Image (cartoon, coloured by chain):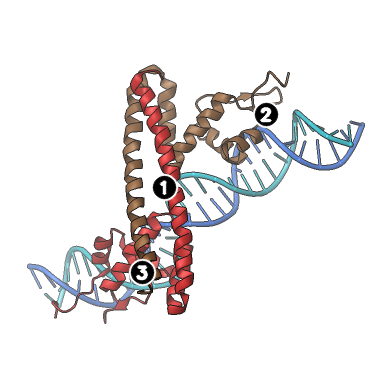
Chain colours: A red, B brown, C cyan, D blue
Amino acid sequence: MTLVDVSLSISEAAERTGLSTHTLRYYERSGLMLERIERAPSSHRRYSDADIGWVEFLTKLRSTAMPISKVREYVELVRLGEDSTPARLELLLKHRASVVAQLDEMANSLAVIDYKIATYRKGSK
Amino acid sequence: MTLVDVSLSISEAAERTGLSTHTLRYYERSGLMLERIERAPSSHRRYSDADIGWVEFLTKLRSTAMPISKVREYVELVRLGEDSTPARLELLLKHRASVVAQLDEMANSLAVIDYKIATYRKGSK
DNA sequence: GTTTGACTTAGAGTGCACTCTAAGTTCTAG
DNA sequence: CTAGAACTTAGAGTGCACTCTAAGTCAAAC
């Protein structure tokens, strides 16, 4: 039956997502998973493809500095079902704006750093 | 003498740099300032243009996720004088690479978020 | 069947970067 | 001269996001 069972153990899920098993449990406890993670009879977690896909998306949100609390808000909207689509869209659009602002600030800082690098290269201090 | 004296109080420096007075003192305690901040006879800090300029640059380093400890390393190199120029250049180039990587990751995440936004707009969940 | 390693939980601990507090001193406006 | 705001210090407190621990259960290999 191993060919049919595509679910992953927590350490496999950790390897796939680049997170630690600690972090996966922490995210779950923090209410960041869309659905309850399935359990084997032994009570060990079994991650589905959908779970992994969600963790990958949530990682994108986190890597763009969305706080855990905001991710949880988003998750709660998803749990409310179809009716919350406009609210989810709004949340993502707001976050999008913050990401663009971050990219902007970082690009600006990079320019300043590059300028400094250039002065070191010219030896003009 | 106010026309001749161009130095700023800590609250003025805070306003100029966008940091809090708490943070300015914290950075100083953490060894992030290039030189000792001048003091008025009253022992109040007086920030020079050079101090402000440095805080502005250090803010660029911080906004690109350079840890306090790395900024301190850089400061210590500056204090060593001209001989440390190659080391400073190397440090900045290494950091530059990390900034480019961050920009890259964030742009990639933005693309994924935009894709999700598009699915919400199409109503295809 | 037993050892070794992966898994479970609740809760404690860590590291970073601030951010605030308390108690006292100094500056500024009226 | 006085009230109140701004400044000083050392040190404590905060919030975030992990990260680890302890004590126990379970699974895979020999």
Q: Which residue is mark 3?
A: B119
- Residue B38 image point, x, y percent: 61, 23
**Quadrant of the frame with the C terminus of chain A:** top left
- Residue B73 image point, x, y percent: 40, 31
Q: At numbered mark 3, what does the secondary structure look like: helix, strand or loop?
A: helix
Which of the two marks, 2 or 3, is nearer to us in this view? 3
Label 3 to label 1: alpha-carbon separation: 23 Å
Residue A66 in sight here? no
Mark 2 or 3, nearer chain start: 2
Q: Which residue is mark 2?
A: B44
Residue type at mark 2 is His
Q: Determine crowd level at label 2: few under 14, some 14-19, many 20+ residues with C-alpha closer than 10 A.
A: few
Q: Which residue is mark 1?
A: A103
- Residue B101 image point, x, y percent: 32, 45
Residue at coordinates 60% horizontally, 41% vertically from top-left? B20
Residue C9 position (above or below residue B65): below
**Quadrant of the frame with the N terminus of chain A:** bottom left
Specify whether A9 is left or right of B14. left
Q: Are marks 3 and 1 in contact (CB under 8 Å)?
A: no
Q: Nearer the viewer, residue B102 or A1?
A: B102
Q: Chain of mark 3?
A: B
Is disc 3 in the same subunit as disc 1?
no
Residue B59 position (above or below residue B121): above
Residue type at mark 3 is Thr
Residue type at mark 1 is Leu
Q: Nearer the viewer, residue A123 or A55?
A: A123
